[in-house]
Image: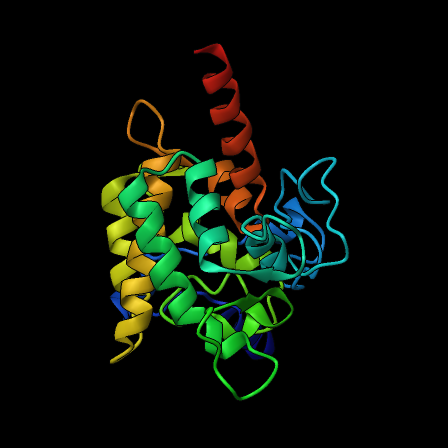
Amino acid sequence: MSSSRTTDQSLQTFASEAAVTMERNINLNLKNQMPLPSLPRALVAADPSHPDGTKGRDHHNMSVLQQHASFFDRNKDGIVYPWETYQGFRAIGCGYPLSIAAGLFINLGLSYPTLPGYLPSLLFPVHIKNIHKGKHGSDTESYDTEGRFEPSKFDAIFSKYGLTHHDALTYEEINKMLKANRNLNDFVGWISSLAEWKLLYNLGKDEKGLIHRETIRAVYDGSLFEHLERKRAARMNKN
């Protein structure tokens, strides 16, 4: 009897004296909804609706984080220069000021950590091969430190913060998540996460102001960027 009680307690996901563990729930059924949800996926952004990742997507043997970044590698040479970042942001529908700022600040922040050597480059290239070295803190941890995708961490976004809709987030819920994910004194991580999620919300929200689970999942492997580029191209062809 004592052994059974100890086992139950050891698997408990909340503590009555830590209210935050009760406010931010964990999906205990995830292991029944998809295989090995705690296993980081190197090649695909998997969740219960997409256990094999985005249907029909060629991962090119890149990590999920590399796939995300490679959208901005417009000439597919493995390196993203500031003008390519600018072109990528324009391709997904961002305006000139935001696209220029992205080309400057993203490459300025990610270039040196991803360089293959120690000498900086004034062209501020971002090397996709080493993009995992540019991962910032204060995030959802859906990417691990090697750039793999962690389904259980991704699912926790919605089990913890999707309180209005189980498969979508409101603007207020995103703000709560961003505040909760902040690491102490990690100002770069705070700003980076805020900028990323605000941009994602503005690009992907629906008419009710919700950003859906599938939209968020698709940004991790870059398939959302490809969808937005096709959508923008189709709209421009009509005009």
> Residue 151, how many percent across, how many down?
59, 55
Image quarter hosting the N terminus: bottom right
Up/down of 57 relative to 16, above or below: above
Q: Residue furthest top?
A: 238
> Residue 106, how many percent across, how many down?
39, 62
Image quarter hosting the C terminus: top left
Foreground of the two, 73 or 132:
73
Foreground of the two, 29 or 186:
186
Q: How is the image coloured?
A: rainbow
Up/down of 49 relative to 28, above or below: above
Q: Residue furthest bottom?
A: 118
Where is residue 170, by image quadrant?
top left
| Residue name at image x 33 percent, y 63 percent | 192
Q: Is residue 99 left or right of residue 184?
A: right
Foreground of the two, 36 or 183:
183
Report how many numbered discs are placed on residues in the image: 0
Where is residue 223, by image quadrant?
top right
Up/down of 202 relative to 160, above or below: above
Q: Is residue 163 left or right of residue 213?
A: left
| Residue name at image x 45 percent, y 70 percent | 110
> Residue 168, how many percent across, how many down?
40, 37
Residue 144 in view in this figure: no
Residue 30 in view in this figure: yes
> Residue 164, how many percent across, how many down?
31, 37
